[in-house]
Amino acid sequence: GAVVSQHPSWVICKSGTSVKIECRSLDFQATTMFWYRQFPKQSLMLMATSNEGSKATYEQGVEKDKFLINHASLTLSTLTVTSAHPEDSSFYICSARPGQPNTEAFFGQGTRLTVV
Amino acid sequence: GEDVEQSLFLSVREGDSSVINCTYTDSSSTYLYWYKQEPGAGLQLLTYIFSNMDMKQDQRLTVLLNKKDKHLSLRIADTQTGDSAIYFCAESIWAGNMLTFGGGTRLMVKP
């Protein structure tokens, strides 16, 4: 089956620093990847949709300058949380969709970010 | 915008059946999903149903869809302690599109 890998699984960083999270599709090419955020005891909320080779589309209320998304290849998308603050502490999870139309998107295992 | 709602909590005894309910508002929802999330883990797709189906069964899981009422349910037969987790329903307009998630139902299975 299709495998999506996120790295790191968890990260602790100091306030003001930047953190990069990687989302890789291991056995398929993903033209579209989605980034979600889940605050404690809450549901997942879509942050942005990234398409390979083009700018990401951000959901309302998500700061594109703070959450930098790069989808430079068909197997890798990165989310960089810039100048992280404690309120950015959350569970970030990506999903990736193969290039074929109308196909399921597969989720990574998620990254737990803690900003201290 | 789209809205997906679930009850927050469900407690059952081991061996009983569990029924987790979900309602959605977007009539153009074509795909409806059930995901399982164990503590500290990512999402595991359990099953999904197309909007032109009323029911789908997969081993211990039965999904019922009432499209008229926009109501989706997940029945877990012979619930085990390993089924304890948070269950999310989600909808999308087409497969592979962004998902809109419900708030999640925490299922607790008592021995």
Image: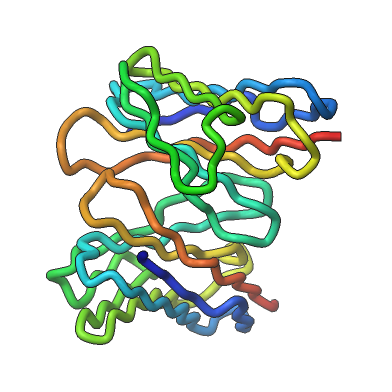
Q: Is residue A40 above or below residue B18?
A: above
Q: Residue furthest left?
A: B52
- Image location of residue B83, percent across then percent down: 56, 65
- Image location of residue A98, percent across then percent down: 26, 30
Image quarter hosting the N terminus of chain B = bottom left
Q: How many marks?
A: 0
Of residues B43 and B23, the one drawn nearer to the viewer in this rendering: B23
Of residues B111 and A74, the one drawn nearer to the viewer in this rendering: A74
- Image location of residue A42, percent across then percent down: 62, 61
Residue at the (37%, 39%) spot, across then down: A106
Q: Is residue A51 left or right of residue A94?
A: left
Image quarter hosting the C terminus of chain B = bottom right
Q: Is residue A61 left or right of residue A74?
A: right
Residue at the (28%, 69%) spot, across then down: B26
Residue at the (34%, 76%) spot, across then down: B72
The quarter holding residue A24 reads top left
Q: Is residue A86 above or below residue A75?
A: below
- Image location of residue B96, percent across then percent down: 27, 44
Of residues A89 and B58, the one drawn nearer to the viewer in this rendering: A89
Q: How is the image coloured?
A: rainbow
The quarter holding residue A21 reads top right
Residue at the (51%, 43%) spot, across then down: A36
Q: Residue furthest top?
A: A73
